[in-house]
Amino acid sequence: MIVRINPFFALQDLGRRRFLAGTGATLSAAAVALMAGRPALAAGQGSKHDDLETDVRILNTALGAELEAIAAYAMGAGSGLLQKPVLDLAVQFQGHHKEHAAVLAKTIRKLGGTPVEAREHYQFPTDGLKTQNDVLGFAAGLERGAVSAYLGAVPLFRGRELASAAASILGDEAMHWAILRQALGQDPVPTAFMS
């Protein structure tokens, strides 16, 4: 079964959010490639069903990361460490993650998959979060990891519309990372190229 997704729908609904971040550590593009079955993709082997399963697997990995980001921003917002303007920003970014998670889950269902669920508990480095800057640094690290993961995952999608939507999310991740860096007093765009 081939499912076509309107790229405008995908871009609009996916908004622009995140892909893969771990518990303070991030998954590399290589890890994304392994989870997505990159060797088979590189070899150009597999059926349309395999392609669909691969796309669903990548989307579920992204959904898992979005759910983790929602929890991370909730933890940061509830820490009592964020001042009003920064707290508002954290809540806004969390809202983006919620939008992306909802659309990713919907897309996974449309493709015949079962969306992953949020974990009951995430391991965040709460002992090391003593100041607003600590929370901002933690969030910036997650967003930077998301940028790298989306960058590695975009070419793995077999469906062009999904790759385009993921690239749109990558752009949002990069904007979040830049804003968080600026809030930390760092150069918001430290390099001309992302890797």
Image (cartoon, rainbow, N blue to C red):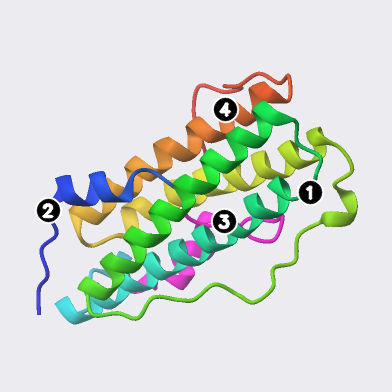
- Tag 4: residue type? Ala
Find out whether residue 69 is within the magenta segment: no
**In front: label 1 or label 4:** 1
Q: Quadrant of the N terminus?
A: bottom left
Image mark for residue 178: 4
**In front: label 4 or label 3:** 3
Label 2 vs label 3: CA separation?
27 Å
Q: Residue at left 60%, top 34%?
A: 88
Of the image marks 3 and 1, the number of the one nearer the N terminus: 3
Q: Which residue is mark 3?
A: 70
What x and y, as percent, mark residue 65?
53, 61
Find out whether residue 19 is within the magenta segment: yes
Position of residue 75 in the picture relative to residue 45 (left or right): right
Label 2 vs label 4: CA separation?
30 Å
Of the image marks 2 and 3, the number of the one nearer the N terminus: 2
- Magenta range: 18-40
Give SS at disc 1.
loop
Q: Is residue 185 visible?
A: yes
Of the image marks 2 and 4, the number of the one nearer the N terminus: 2
Of the image marks 1 and 4, the number of the one nearer the N terminus: 1
CB atoms of marks 4 and 3 within 8 Å:
no
What x and y, as percent, mark residue 78?
73, 50
**In front: label 2 or label 3:** 3
Give SS at disc 2.
loop
What x and y, as percent, mark residue 123?
75, 66
Q: Which residue is mark 1?
A: 79
User: Crowding near pointer 4: few (<14 within 10 Å), some, many (20+)?
Assistant: many
User: Crowding near pointer 1: few (<14 within 10 Å), some, many (20+)?
Assistant: some
Image mark for residue 67: none
